[in-house]
Image (cartoon, rainbow, N blue to C red):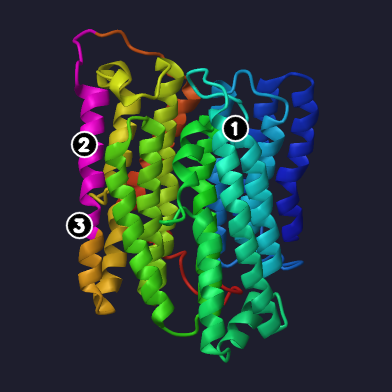
Amino acid sequence: MDITMLLAIPFIFAAIACGVSFAKKPKVGGAVATLGVFITLVMMFYLPLTPAYGLATTQISQLVAMTVLIIGVLASLCSVSYMTDAKARFYPLLLVFIGGTLGLVLSQNIMMLYLFLEVATLSSTVLIAHEGKDSYGNKGRTVDAATKYAFLNVMASVLALIGLILIYQQANSFDLKAIATAMAGAPKNLTYLISILLLIGLGTKGGLVPLHAWLPDAYGEAPTPVTIMLAGAMTEVALYALAVMLYAVIPAFSVVQYFILLMAVLTIAVGSLLMFTEKDLKKLLAYSSIEQSGLIIFGIALMSPLAMVGGVFQMVNHMLMKSLLFICAGAIIFTVGTKKIDELSGLAKRMPVVAVGFIIGFLAIAGVPPFNGFQSEYMILQAAFNAGLGWLAAIAVVSTFPMFAMYLIVMQKIFFEGAKEGAERIKVPAVFTVSIIILSLACIVIGLYPELITKLITGSLIGGT
């Protein structure tokens, strides 16, 4: 099957959803969106894909793409219950957003990669501002969050584009394999300049410190199904794009990589510490995403085979773990009606599935065995020690302690503090419950059998080699 036909499916269903949504049938629009993403996932899983027009699959890109689609199915499914008054543009843009992230991951051409990244960025900007007000009815907060997101990401896009133009001038090609060959002989100063431009441009979209200012507001104010896609797909595919470009541009370990590693550790520390400043559940989880972005880039920037496996594995794991946590948060917000941590308590007995799912997500993201996060984090730390950077890995590990402590405090407050015997159960929509169970099982099964994922992370990020 031609890969362009696969990629066209989300956009075709976006057109269908557009007609349905403008007929003022939001639930049908949600069903159309879920069906479109599910069909794309099934076809990608079962059908061989023929490269075309700069699009191709590697084993790594196919794994990341399938994870994006799994998250897309769950986000679309949850939106059917959550977005009861969705505007006509919501589902078409959600499908365009998913299509953009999918196209980016499948691109082996830097301009195609850039164009799909911008499609995802533009569509997600409108989705962040979709409701026009926050969960408490305060007007303008979602618009303000979307404006900050757009402003910082436009600047990031310009810098990334300058970097890509410089790459083209050196390689005379947009193909990643040709670029990797050409950049091996590039002047060091040019390599450093391009690396910094890409790091700032794509690192902003990936939420790396100090380029993270948009992320807490965007995650916190966007409708929860959009937050699931932002946290479970958008940030990760931006980091995936950064990883692909760094592997193409940097031929050997250099001063640039030391800079990226230090930036990654700073991101881990800042994201972890800033969790203590937050009283909003979604924004607290957003700071946790910043911490995880640092860990992913720390692994990838080591640029050894083990580190690449660990970094990509951590990327996939984070997509699953953070989607689980945000779906749990969405279930709480939807049923209880608040995202303020101080207003939540005693939910373990009233929402047991949500409580168990949140605890599993926390243990996984904290790297506690036997959950999936432990396996990938262990690989990254092992790769750092093998590279003689055990001291830096130790700093990174210590920097995660505030995150671990804050999760414990929040779980105690939300789920166990003030719990009452015989408290009435809160009815959680079935789509949330099913999504939580699926992702919880994924975190457990992958943790027990990591080879299910690691055996797929073989070869290269570039060109199917």
Q: Is residue 51 left or right of residue 129?
A: right
Compared with residue 256, is residue 108 higher up or lower down, i.e. above or below?
Answer: above
Element type at mark 3: helix
Residue stretch rendered in magenta on the structure: 397-422
Q: Which residue position holds label 3? A: 398
Q: Amino acid at mark 2?
A: Leu
Q: Which residue position holds label 2? A: 408
Residue at position x 40%, y 19% from top? 338
Alpha carbon of mark 2 to alpha carbon of mark 1: how far? 32 Å
Q: Nearer the viewer, mark 1 or mark 3?
A: 1
Q: Quadrant of residue 47?
A: bottom right
Residue 122 on image: x %, y %: 67, 46
Residue 258 on image: x %, y %: 36, 75
Q: Amino acid at mark 3?
A: Val
Dot 2 or dot 1, earlier in sequence: 1
Alpha carbon of mark 2 to alpha carbon of mark 3: how far? 16 Å
Mark 2 touching mark 1, by CB under 8 A? no
Q: Amino acid at mark 1?
A: Val
Q: Quadrant of residue 433?
A: top left
Q: Which residue position holds label 1? A: 143
